[in-house]
Image (tube, grey):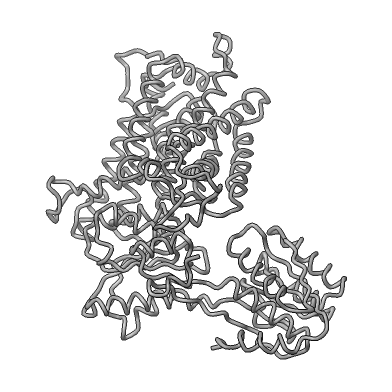
Amino acid sequence: MKKTILAASVATMLTSTVSAETIGVSMALFDDNFLTVLRNGMIDMADEMDGVDIQVEDAQNDVAKQLDQINNFVASGVDAIIVNPVDTSATLAMTAAAEAAGVPLVYVNRQPINVDSLPNNQAFVASNEIESGTLETFEICKNLRAAGKGGGARAYVMMGELSNQAAVQRTKDIEDVLAMDMCNFIEVVDQQTANWSRDEAQDLMTNWLSSGEPFDAVIANNDEMAIGAIQAMKAAGIDMGAVQVGGVDATADALAAMAAGDLDVTVFQNAAGQGSGALDAALKLAAGEEVDQKVYVPFELVIPANLGNYAN
Amino acid sequence: MSKSSHGIGGLTFDDKKKARAPEWNVFFALVLIVAIFEGLGAILMGQSLLFDTADRFDSIFNEARLKIIILQVSIIGIIALGATQVIILGGIDLSPGSIVGATAMIAMSFAQVAEINGMANPKLMFAGVSDLPVIVPIFIGILCGVVAGAINGALIAYTKIPPFIATLGMMVFARGVAKWWSKGQPISFPTDSYAALGKGMTPVFIFIALAILFHLILKYTVYGKHTYAIGSNEQASRMSGIKVERHKVLVYTIAGVLAALAAIVLSSKNLTAQAGMGIMYELDAIAMTVIGGVSLAGGRGSILGTVLGALIFGVIISGFTFLRLDAYYQEMVKGVIIVGAVVLDQYRQKRNAARM
């Protein structure tokens, strides 16, 4: 889709920036691993550019505090604002505050409730959740075919918290891929929630194993559950070479499991890419340029073959 | 008054009138639930829950399922052993889940290896603090439980604030500690000796050993008699010379230590510690206790009942997965069973009281 927009726009930015720009950033919270990487992605990009000043504030997961920060940014006359919303249903007031002052606003990582009605000088930068479960499941489908199981294979599906949007979306992605002609040889034996938890996943997998059903793959909504499933299977003496296991997140633990030959597929959400993408969009809007209102930073498939690019 | 062998202060009432021990009712409930799952399994799945209908094992039982039924409740079961004592004492403890989170994080940060797959451990918490003997994280973990439990007990005994509030405070505080310790980052890759604590069926052996230990302690020691006495009638216990305050601190401290032990086993079993570990464990532990016939009014119940309550929990979880029941319905049914168990228990108590 917009795979090249980032690189291309960064290149033009580097040559076209002349005057100093000040960008205000309000992060939902600082003490979150993923959001910290995203924040650093913005800061690193700003450091490399001349004449870009960014001021990052911590909303400490407080909706009211975040709105105050935005109003403070407006009052101090920033050129654009980047918001990582605390609560995606509380963004109407933020959009209104920035719009009234004529300051461009970019939402990052979390989709605001008013994403389809944003004014022209506001945008949304994130990864498209539809990609993660799709990449994961399709890769497992290909691997099963390559293993000569194209005539029929059986998979268990582990879901995250049922109340969580990412879990619902990723599960739907799995179902959609398994409905494709190329992958409909895979039958889902059972799908249950393990609430994103490694411990619950271990117990769930062991319960599944106790039924003695044959299976060829475990498709999990995140890496933690995939690792739990792996631990349970190893405890039961199952040959990990004969089972495809997939997760999402590319956590350090998951990469170690992949290096050990246990995990077959995971998907990397580019936090730093989202950060720099948001800053890029904010700078363009501040310069009065056109920006797509939804900028999607692609998820990246991680498999043993390209593991080296991610293990650091 | 119940006619169990544990009356006030462990006294036994008129033997001739002695009713069936309440644990039998829990046991019958367990058998009934197994029978329901066996029946549904035969109709819906053409399989047995507990028996080896496909001839996969040497014995007549489905050994894998028997193992997981108890394994999956062992860790919360350890917490429930503490909850049993606190509830018999007439109190309540909402903090074990958070103590599990904090203890897992702290203990695991002293149990890490320096290298994984030949590369530096990407999750190493303290540079240079790695590959320590397993006794170090165990000792530090238990210390966390002692401190948290003693604070709970001291607040309840000496400031007289209700246990619900004191332990609610600890629940929030300890969860904060769990998040602060590594700024929300998971801590992974423990030493082999630490990993052995939760490997395979070890959690079950630890749970059973602790259950036997506390069963004997509650039944045959002064500590046990005082716990039942205070739970039955705090005023009378005080008048008869029991040091109620000191005893409360002791019971809550033991509950804290059991939560810490659960944390060590849990983080070992999963080879990781995460700030969100143990959320809601206290409520599952309380539910096991209550299903096992421990009265929230205090003074009544036993470790054996709680172990049976834990087994009911395990059978339900495995039974649901066995029947491939949709996840949405599982929680609904679980809620009904928790309330149903207590309603039945109340009814039985009233009936016994009427017969007296």
The answer to whether one can see residue B290 in this image is: no
Question: Is B271 rendered above or below residue A127?
Answer: above
Q: Give how far across and how far down residue B50 sits, in percent.
A: 21, 48
The answer to whether one can see residue B328 in this image is: yes
Tally of numbered discs: 0
Query: In the displayed structure, does residue B265 sit left or right of residue A29?
Result: left
Question: Is B113 rendered above or below residue B207?
Answer: below
Question: Is B239 rendered above or below residue A279?
Answer: above
Residue B77's quadrant in the figure? top left
Give the residue displayed 43% in from the left and 78% down from the top. Answer: A134
Residue B99's quadrant in the figure? top right
Q: Nearer the viewer, residue A289 or B345?
A: A289
Q: Give how far across and how far down residue A260 sits, in percent.
A: 35, 61
User: Residue lying furthest top in this view?
Assistant: B240
Question: Is B282 rendered above or below residue A194?
Answer: above
Query: In the displayed structure, does residue B143 sit left or right of residue B266?
Result: right
Give the residue displayed 67% in from the left and 60% down from the top. Answer: A29
Residue A48's quadrant in the figure? bottom right
Q: Nearer the viewer, residue A252 or B263?
A: A252
Q: Give how far across and how far down residue B27 sits, in percent.
A: 29, 35
**In what quadrant of the picture does the N terminus of chain A appear?**
bottom right
Give the residue displayed 49% in from the left and 28% down from the top. Answer: B254
Q: Give how far across and how far down residue B242 sits, in percent.
A: 54, 12
Query: In the displayed structure, does residue B326 sit left or right of residue A241?
Result: right
Give the residue displayed 29% in from the left and 52% down from the top. Answer: A235
